Structure formats: structure tokens, C-alpha cells
Image (cartoon, coloured by chain):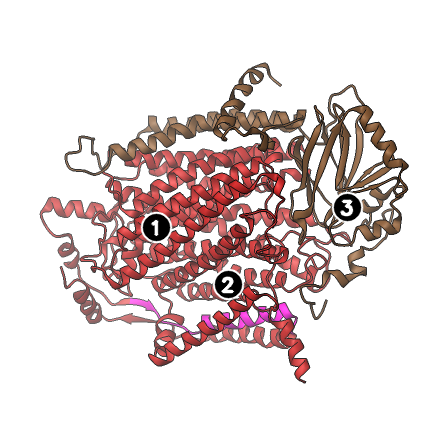
Chain colours: A brown, B red
Amino acid sequence: MRPYLRVLTPLLVIVMAVVLAGCGEQYIVLDPKGPIGSTQRDLIVITTVLCSIIIVPVLIMTAVIGWRYRDRKGSKAKYKPNWDHNSKLEFTWWSIPIVIIIILAAITAKYTFELEPSKAMASTEEPVVIEVTSLDWKWLFTYPEEGIATVNYIKIPEDRPIRFQLTSDITMNSFWIPQLGGQLYTMSGMAMTLYLQADEPGTYFGTGANFTGKDFAQMTFDVDAVSDEEYAAWIDEVKATDNELTDEGFEKLRQRGTSDVQLFSAFPEGLFQKVMTQFAVGGMSHHHHGVIDAPADSNDQGSHAGH
Amino acid sequence: MWDKIKDFASEFFVTGDPMILGAQVSIALAIVAIVFVLTFFKKWRWLWTEWLTTVDHKRIGVMYIICSLLMLFRGGVDALLMRMQLAAPQLEFLNADHYNAIFTTHGVIMIFFMAMPLMFGLFNIVVPLQIGARDVAFPFLNSFSFWMFFFGAMLFNVSFVIGGSPDAGWLAYPPLSGLEGSPGLGQDFYIWGIQISGMGSLATGINFIATIIKMRAPGMKLMQMPMFTWSTMASCVTIIFAFPILTVTLFLLYLDRFVGTHFFTLDGGGNPMMYINLIWMWGHPEVYIVILPAFGILSEVVSTFSKKKLFGYKSMVFALMSISIVSFFTWAHHFFTMGSGAGVNTFFAISTMVIAIPTGVKVFNWLFTMVRGRISFTTPMMWVFAFIFCFVVGGMTGVMLSVAPADFQFHNSYFLIAHFHQVLIGGVVFGYFAGLTYWWPKVFGFRLHEGLGKWAFWLWNIGFYVCFFPQYALGFMGMTRRINTYSFDMGWQPLNVVSTVGAFLMGAAFLFQVWQIAHSIRVHKMDANGDSWGDGRTLEWSIPSPVPFYNFARTPQVTGTDDWWEKKQRAEAAGKSVYDMEAAEPLEPIHMPKNSNIPFIMSTFWFFAGFGFVWEWMWMVIPSLIGVIICMIARSFSYNTDYYVPVSEVERTEAALRGTN
């Protein structure tokens, strides 16, 4: 990040916080706890300011012009009914937006590449890999390196990049932890990469952002960022429980419905890849989707004669 | 037997929800009441000959507007139901399925069946009059367009009580909208409702381009056309390139559902992303289709009530046309977060920002039209100010959204919801309200009541900001769109309550508008000479209101922009009445199109074909499509489609209309 932005943004953040009634804690997008979220917050502030350079004068001008040229008896304002062109003026208001947009475009281009979600973060630490599978209507998180799995809950070590691998079993969702950074879609048949990092310990709100049907609203989860030691202890604790996610268990889990938080000491090898490639022609697995095989649950809107 | 009927009825009708049952009963009662009133007052023939079979662009326009206001009511009720459900955490006012159906129908109805017909209504009423034409280029096709829209809208709305509403979002992304995600009939109603009305929209686009290019009064050059006509042109050009994409996309989705193809499915090599690209290739131009005419309306209203020429005419035309082109290169900004990669995102981010330039220029031109003018604050002009304030801020949040890396935090949040409502209500709706009040006297011969209009104006405006500004904040709080409920500890409730209050204020504003219209119909002063606001500039104000069916007794000879204003100036300079000068010209017989019942009948067949497709009842589809083809053949062999209005009739009509002069 450029030095001038460093100076500018805290100031603007304060202004914005005041504008937004001061209760900054609730405005989680503006109260980021990780590097990605912070840069995005800064960008939001910068664009707000850049746009305001045009918008605020225009709003004031509109009010002033409306007042000054209102039709009333004895108005001293000029009246020139045929004044309809002035090259200098028109040149001015073509060029001001052009200049602002060029600046904004440059900033956008730079940060679009910088914040490309699949780009590895600069860090001395090795990233933690977490595989994310959106199911109807719950999140399955598998930790391939640690060998554990969770439902609707993530624990991560602070100050370490997390490489989220995203896919979906069926419908398209979007994986979003606002205080760590922006969202990315989970789509079946592909794996996308999203790097995030938490700079301080805390519990952060996570949610599905793209509509997936009936109980979409229940797809929220907590993200706990803790110290390395606590994280390692938690992994051991989960591993020590006698609660393994089996293939049958997964078949049950993927059925439509909501779920509470669940912790699994182990999960079937390559589960994420299997879900991801389930529809691939000539791929690893020719497994047909559960909903087709078991339609009992999906017919609650009345069945279709020919279907 | 009885059980069979009961089974069929429980599948056919939506059952088990008291609210929907209430709606079913009230719909049945309303139908009975309408039939009774028409029969009692012996109005069936009148309805058929004067309205259902008319090809008169003004009457078609009025029918479009009536439908769109009814749809505004239905979409508005949907909105209020949603806002009630969200007013408190963990409410059980609407269950998840019902909520999902309601936000889906709210979106579809507001865009396809409220904004589009309101726009087409204004095109129909205004464009032929502004260019000095007697009707549109293809009056028969115009009537067909209306009835296709009407029956498409009916088909969509019927799903509420018969078969079940769609509930996969207004753009119905697969896989959710595919057979697996949405096995019910709702999606099929969605597809066929939109397909049928979409054919009408495409035909309207073609019709108005032809009208504007071929039917202008002698002397009117392209660069002398009124700005609303230019905006219609820009919008229609966008329609003819965008709507075919929609038709093809929905057709492919239907094939996936109906015959089991794999265009957008997960298995068999299908790709849902393809649907999302295609639907937004139509969807983004669509929002410009509806906003461009609002820009045109503003230009007319600002110029009229500032009593001054429009500033920067050439800039305006260039801005309109460039928006219509650039709008085709921004679609991927609806899914920056789907992993297109930094290069693609950068391109679409910048192309989106570029649109802000011509849009900004238009605002400056409107402002400088007011500078050195004399602004009368009539209700249309007040709507202009409401538009500028609201749209400029909405445009700013749009630019914020276009910054791709920041959009990762805005996407799918209430920030986005607030943004697009701000440009669609603050832009499209406020702009169209300006147009509706501005041209109302042209259509009906009297103005709408100003006092009640101002009540509605303030309620709409206050309601808007109270409803949607909290939603920007909710976006920053991480509230995502389309959730039917949220938990206590999110802290979202206070702002949601405020937002709900705002929504109800807008609901009250709508009631004031209904009252305004009803009151104005009862109590009004008829227009003296057709120049209802006294400062009309363009040709539509040169003829009496309500406009005679042939529009112009004499084909106007145009010499410049704002021709009517110029004529009035010249008459004043010569010390004569402009109307006497006009009346001095000789009359000629007027060539007019004849009414036709084919569009109505053919669209009815389309309705039944669509209904049959939804239920997969081939016994209904096949005869209906045969009916459509017979209608087309019947039309090709009807030669008696036009006639001449004799001079004597024109003289009589004009004398009656100009009698007060």
C-alpha cells in the first residue's frame, strides 16, 4: 500500500465512522481484522472520497440552481431562453468525470491484480489449507493436513494465511467472512482459491452470500481465530473425539436440511476432490447426485407430471 | 371420480396457505364483480371495439400504464410483506418458501411487468405525437406487442394461485432453477411468462425504431428530434440486441427442464456459468433500457419548466447513444466474485466506470438547462429534482460497486440492494412519474391534482431514504440479500425496523397517487387548447387534448428543434394566434389503420400454449399453437386493413375540440 494512502485512510475512516453513527463495531465490513479486509476497506473509503469530489458539489449546485432560477415575480436572475450551448462548459464537464474515472480505473486495476483471491499472500508462515464445501444448507469444512472436518464452524490460527479451497456439492453459494475479506463463490465442478488471514484473535461472522433455496438463511457460521498453541490443542482435541465422518455420514450430511455445529475426528480421504469431480465426464467419479436418487425431499412444491 | 378431482385440484391450485387462499377468494370475487359491472352497464361491446381490438397507439399506451400501475401494486405488496418479515429477528410471519417466492416475484414483476410496460406506455403515448406521426409504423404489431405483454404477465401472475410461484430469484440462476433445484411448476411459469411478454417487447423495439426513422414529420431531421424520442431510440436499439439473448437463454433453460438437455446442468457437460453470462448479457443492458427513457423524460420536463432550450443537445444525444453501446460491455460486473480472474475483472470494472461519464454529463446538461431559465415547481419538475438527488447518489454507489476488489465486500449484501433500488426507484420510477404527470393532460385533457401529487411526492421521497439508506449500513454490517430471517445477536434489527417504516411510507405514497388520480377524474378543469402546461415546446402540445384519434389534423411542417415553441414565438411576433395560423392550412383526408381483433385472439392462444407448456399438457399446447398459426394466416390474407378519414369528419372533430378557442 502506498504511503499517502496510509496517511489518508485512517483519517477518512474516522470521518466515515462518525457518519455511520459511531457504533463502528457493528459495521464489520469497515472494521476488518485481516490484511485483505483492510485493503478492501481502504478501497471503499478511497472510492467514496473520489466520487464525493464530484457528487457533493453537484448536489449543492442542484439546490442552488433550483433556488436561484425559480420562477417568481421580480426575479433578478438572468433569463436567456435560447442559451443552449457553450463549448467551454461542456468540455469541462466531459473532462472532470473522465479524469476522476481514469484515476479510479488505475487504482482499480492495480488492486484487482493485487487482491486476486487466488494469489498467495506474502507471509513467512506456511498457509493453512481448509477445504470448503457448500451443501444444501450447511457448510462442510475439511482440514486435509490435520485430517479433521467440521460443519458450520471454523477455527484458524491468527497471523497465518489461510488457503480456502472452495467448491459446492450442488447449488452455487458464496463464502463470506466480512471481517477477514471479500467473498468468493463456491461452485460445483470446480475448486476456487481464496486467501484470507486474521491479524488478531477473535470470533468472526461468516455466512453464505448467494441464495441457494429454502434454508439459505441458516448457512451462517463462526470463525474463531486463536493463537498457534490453542489451534494445535484444538486439533488434538477434535482428533481425540470418537466421531469420524464416514462416506455414509457424508451421504446423510449432503441431504437437504440444516445442521448444527459438528466436529469430526476424521473424514474420508479425498472427499473434497470427489465432490468436486462428481459431475465430470470421464472424471474421477461417476457418482450421480443424491437428490436425483432420493427425490423424496425435493418434491414439496408439487410434482411435475412429466418429470 | 371425486377423489381424482380433489387430487387434481390440490395439485392445480396452490393450497395450504391462508394468505394465498385469501388472494384466491379475492381474485374470484374481483372477476365476478368485473363481469357483473360490464354486463350490467352493457359495456362488453364497448370494451371489445374501443379497447381490446384497438390499434390506436394512445389507447395501447393507456392500457400499458394501467397494467403497470396494477403490477406496481402487486410488486409493492410483495415488498411490504418482505419488509414485515425482516422487521424483527426470527419472525415467522412468512415461512422460508413463501419468502423466497415473494422476493422472486417482486423482482420479476417490478422489472418485467411494471418498469417495462410503464416505459412502453410512455413510448406509445408520446413518441408518435412528438414526431408528428398519425400512429406507429406498424399499428397491428403494436397491438400484438401489448397483448403479448398482457398475457405473459397474466401467465406469470397466475402462478401465485395456480401451480405455485417461482422461488429461485428474479434471474433464476441454475443449478437452483434447474429441475433438481426447483422441481415445481413455478420456474416454468417464470420462463413462459417472460418468454411470451418478451416477444412483445422485442416487437415494440423494432416498431419504435421503424417509427422514429420513417414516420417523422416532414422537415424534422434526426438531430432535431425531441430528446425523449432520442432516448426511445437508444432504448429500442438496446432492446433489439438484448432481448434475443434473453429469449434464447430462457429457451435453453426450458429445454434443460423439459427435454433433459444439458446446457446449464451440472452433469452431462453442462455449465451453469454459461447461463449466468448469458442472462447478464441481457440483464445489464436491460437496466439501461429502462433508465434511458427516464433521461429523455427529464430532458423534456427540465426544458419545459425552465422555459428554456435544452442545454448541450448534441452532448445529450452522444451520451444516450454511447450508454446504449457501452451497456453491452459491462455484464460481468454482476459476478466479479465468481473467479473470472484479475484481467477480466479489470476490463469489466473499467467499462462499468466509463458509463458514469456520459451519465454525469447529462446531469450537468440538465442543471445548465435550468441556469438562466425560469423554473416553475410543478409536480413533474419536483420529480426531476428528486430524480437528480437520488440518482446521483445511486450512481456514486454504483461506481463504488464497480471497483472490482471492493465489490468482493459489497456483492450480495444489502449495500447492493440499496444501490439498485436507488437507481431503479430514484432513477426509473421517479423519472417515469415525472413523465406520467407531465403527459397526463395530453392523454386525458386535464391535469392531475397538484396538492395530492405533492403529498405523494414527499411521502415517496422521505419513504425512499428512510427505507434504503439503512440498507447501505446493513450491507456494511454483513447482512446478505435474500435471507428470510436473521438471529438476534447480529444487531441488525434497529435498522431493519427503520427500513420497514420507510417501505410503508412509500406504500402510503402510492395510495396518495391512487387518490390523486381518482380525485382528478372526479374534479378537474378541462384543458383549453392542448398546450396544457402553457410552455409546451414540442409537437405534442400543438394539438388538442385529449388527442383526436388521428393525432394531427394537418401534417406538421417542422423547421427546427422545439418546433412548437418556435411557432408560438413567431406567431407572437406577428401578433397573431398560433392556432389561427395553423387552421389556415387546408385539410386533406387522413390515412388510418383499422382495428383488428387478431392480436388479442393470437395472444390468447399464446397464453394457452404457455399454460400448456408449463403443465406439459400437449393436448393444450398443440391446438393453441395451431390457433396462433391460423391467426397469422388470417392476418396475411386480410387486405382491408386501412381507411381514409374524410375531410368533413376531420373538420367536425377539430371544430368540436377547438370550440373553446
- Mark 2, secondary structure of its residue: helix
Between B505 and A293, the one lying in front of the other is B505
Disc 2 residue type? Answer: Ala
Q: Are marks 3 and 2 on the same chain?
A: no
Label ID, residue B456: 1
Residue at numbered disc 3: A189
Cα–Cα span, label 3 and label 2: 36 Å
Residue at numbered disc 2: B153
Is B344 left, or right, of B451 in this rendering?
right
* Chain on which label 2 sits: B
Residue B187, above or below B644: above
Is A90 left, or right, of B145 in this rendering?
left
* Chain on which label 3 sits: A
Identify the residue at horizontal 10%, vertical 46% (top origin): B574
What is the crowding at mark 2: few (fewer than 14 residues within 10 Å), some, or many (at least 20)?
Answer: many
Between B525 and B488, the one lying in front of the other is B488
